[in-house]
Image: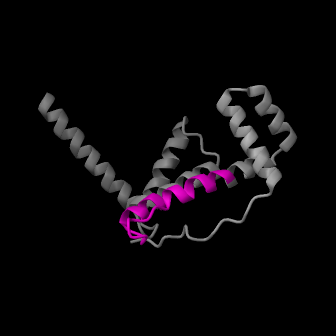
């Protein structure tokens, strides 16, 4: 079972940074593009980092779930890995609407979730491909 690396406490954000980040998030939620753009202009490129800081505070506590006895369990490690993967996607500005973004996400998911040692990603992908091919061929035989 992979080690749970989501136990380190997050350093506190600066109050102004929290205010700026959440003002932007609220503007986006409300569909107020003018306000969101104004906040982005005022904050500058720092907004990206601020939003990642907020994302970490949202995803990590939720995905680092413990079982009912307060001890990490198999599901808490999976949830923590999914949270880390989501943050990694955000950090690298992956566009999930593009073919490249989808492919990168599949590779990262395989690396972070389906392999424990982050090695053997190619082999796991080959196994997934073989399973998919087998399923497709069986489905094709029954319809042909």
Q: Is residue 112 above or below residue 131?
A: below
Give me the residue at 39% from left, 65% from top.
67
Q: Is residue 94 left or right of residue 116?
A: right
The image shows residue 42 at horizontal and vertical percentages of 87, 40
Nearest the eye: 10 or 131 = 10
Residue 77 position in % (x across, y down)? 43, 65
**Rendering coords of residue 78 (x, y %):** 42, 60
Task: Tell me which corner region of the image, top left, top right, bottom left or bottom right, holds residue 116.
Answer: bottom left
Q: Is residue 63 magenta?
A: yes
Rendered position, 77 above or below 130:
below
Residue for point 79% across, 44% down? 20
Q: Quadrant of the C terminus?
A: top left
Q: In this picture, which residue range is highlighted in magenta?
A: 54-80
Extreme front residue here?
A: 69
- Number of numbered labels in the structure image: 0
Asked whether residue 144 appears in the rendered view, the answer is: no
> Could you say which is closer to the camera, residue 46 or residue 134?
46
Q: How is the image coloured?
A: one colour
Residue 126 is covered by the magenta coloring: no
Q: Residue at x 53, y 70 (%)?
A: 5
> Which secondary structure class fits the magenta region best?
helix
Residue 138 as seen in the image, left or right of residue 41? left
Image quadrant of residue 125? bottom left
Q: Residue 75 at x, y = what percent? A: 38, 61
**The N terminus lies in quadrant:** bottom left
Question: Viewed as shown, does residue 77 lie left or right of 130?
Answer: right
Q: Nearer the viewer, residue 68 or 78?
A: 68
């Amino acid at each position: 079972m992979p080690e749970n690396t989501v136990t380190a406490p997050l350093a506190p954000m600066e109050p102004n940074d929290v205010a700026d980040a959440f003002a932007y998030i609220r503007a986006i939620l409300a569909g107020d593009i003018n306000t969101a753009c104004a906040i982005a202009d005022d904050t500058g490129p720092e907004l990206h980092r601020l939003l990642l800081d907020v994302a970490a505070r949202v995803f990590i506590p939720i995905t680092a779930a413990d079982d009912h006895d307060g001890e990490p369990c198999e599901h808490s490690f999976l949830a923590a890995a999914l949270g880390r993967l989501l943050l990694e996607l955000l950090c690298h500005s992956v566009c999930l609407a593009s073919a490249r973004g989808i492919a990168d996400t599949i590779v990262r998911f395989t690396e972070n979730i389906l392999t424990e040692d982050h090695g053997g990603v190619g082999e796991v992908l080959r196994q997934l491909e073989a399973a998919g091919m087998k399923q497709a061929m069986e489905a094709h035989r029954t319809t042909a």
